[in-house]
Image (cartoon, rainbow, N blue to C red):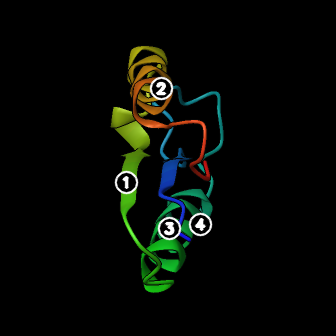
Amino acid sequence: MNEKRIVMLSVGVGDYASPKVNDLNLTTADARAMAQALLSLGRGETHLRLLLDAAATKAGIKAGIDWLAQTVGPDDLA
């Protein structure tokens, strides 16, 4: 039996542009940790996209979701 491909979009925003919003200390670290945990599984083919802080704009997240939709197949884990 073939192993399922693993596909992940991990997003972490902690550094907000608006001074009205308090920055969060752990969100980018959590997104990185999730990505690292996925990679450390060492299971078959892995596709990962990581969006942090300034890259995690509305357009960036939409592009990430579009990438996820185009990349994941019916037998994959996402």
Pointer 1 or 3: first along the chain: 3
Which residue is identified by label 4? 30
Q: Which circle's residue, 4 or 2, is located before the other in the chain?
A: 4
Q: Nearer the viewer, residue 15 or 52?
A: 52
Front-lying residue, 43 or 18: 43
Residue drawn where x is 47% and y is 26% of the image: 61
- Disc ID at residue 2: 3
* Badge 3 element: loop
- Residue 62: percent from left, percent from top: 47, 17
Residue located at (41% from left, 73% from top) = 44
- Mark sitting on residue 47: 1
Q: Amino acid at mark 2?
A: Ile
Amino acid type, mark 3: Asn
Circle 1 or circle 2, nearest the eye: 1
Q: In the structure shown, which secondary structural element does the residue marked by tag 4 occupy?
A: helix
Res 61 label: 2
Q: Residue at x 39, y 28 (%)?
A: 67
Mark 3 residue crowding within 10 angstroms, few (<14) / some (14–19) / many (20+): few
Instruction: Kindly report the distance in space between the C-alpha atoms of the residues bearing marks 1 and 3.
Output: 16 Å
Amino acid type of disc 1? His
Q: Earlier in the sequence, mark 1 or mark 2?
A: 1
Front: mark 3 or 2: 3
